[in-house]
Image (cartoon, rainbow, N blue to C red):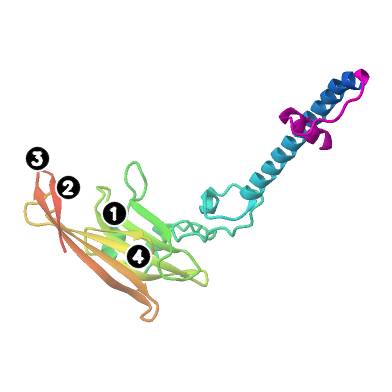
Amino acid sequence: MRGLGRRHLGADGVREPAMTSPTARRAAPARTARAGRGATAGAIRAAAALAAATGLALVAGCSTGGTGARDEGPAHTDPVGHAAAPSPTPSTVPLPSRQRVNPVKLVMGDPKVSEEVKKGLKPCMTNGYPVDASYGKLTGTAATDVLVNVLTCDSVGVGSYVYREEKGRYENVFQDEEQPVYAQIDRGDLVVTQKVYERGDSVTYPSSEDVITYRWSASANRFTEQDRTHNDYSNAVGGEKTPTADN
């Protein structure tokens, strides 16, 4: 650094080192060149050190916590992070392993099912028995509940039943045989749709429908009605009817 300082002062004409002989004067350019090379090497080393420090600062900045994209739950891809995984929503919680039931056997062996429904439950020509079975959480127990819809071969619902497993046996905890009827599981609720026909209506085009939502009550140990919606169907082109909500 002293060599760099002398070169700078000499160039400005402030402090020129004394030279008493031609030999010394001839040696000055060599010393100046060596000083220049030393200054250049020092500058390179300083620049390299600065770049390394900048890189370390950037790495440190990237590895610290924050509220950016890495906090978006499933989108987290940093293998070093230790953020806790998000809690699964009810729609993503997997159902426990279960053995699928035979819905036909379940209905036929149920003493609560009417004889009319049992007599009408016969296999269709091509697709077997007209029975739909759904599995889900309806009654709040650890076991999976079973929802069974019995239809005719013309796809008209004649009965909807909910079975809850208890000690390896299935108990009928809900049934609706007000025809035509069809039930579904919707986010833990039981939604029952009943078609309403008036004189002159075809099976395909009812005049209206009632949509009833049930929810399991642990205190009452049964399903209780939570909501009811009535839809009237208006005539449309081609004889079809379009629903108009009437709450």
Q: Residue at (27%, 48%) from the top-left corner?
A: 153
Label 4 SS: strand
- Residue 237's mark? 3
Placement of 203 over or under 107, stated as above or below? above
Q: Which of 4 and 72 lies nearest the eye of the viewer?
A: 4
Q: Start and end of the magenta stretch?
A: 1-23
Q: Where is residue 185 in the image (x, y as percent from the top left)?
A: 36, 60
- For this orientation, the residue located farthest to the bottom is 219
Q: Which mark is residue 151?
A: 1
Which residue shows up at 42% across the image and 62% down it? 146
Residue 112 at least partly seen:
no
Query: Which residue in the structure is indicated by mark 4?
Result: 189
How far is disc 3 from disc 2 in space, using C-alphas?
Answer: 15 Å
**Mark closest to the chain's N terminus, 3 or 2:** 2
* As drawn, 245 above or below 205: below
In the image, residue 135 lies at what x, y percent?
Answer: 43, 59
- The quadrant the N terminus occupies is top right
* Secondary structure of residue under mark 1: strand
Q: Name the residue under label 2.
A: 204
Gap in Å between the C-alphas at discs 1 and 3?
28 Å
**Residue 50 seen in render:** yes
The mark total stands at 4
Disc 2 residue type (three-letter): Thr
Q: Which mark is residue 105?
A: none
Label whose residue precedes the other's in the sequence (1 or 3): 1
| Dot 1 alpha-carbon crowd within 10 angstroms: few under 14, some 14 to 19, many 20 or more | many
Q: Are marks 4 and 2 in contact (CB under 8 Å)?
A: no
Whether the residues at callouts 3 and 2 have beta carbons within 8 Å, the answer is no
Q: Marks 3 and 4, Cα distance to the nearest angstrom?
A: 35 Å
Q: In this view, does 225 lie to the left or right of 137?
A: left
Rendering coords of residue 63 (x, y %): 64, 50
Label 4 Cα crowd, 10 Å radius (few <14 / some 14-19 / many 20+) = some
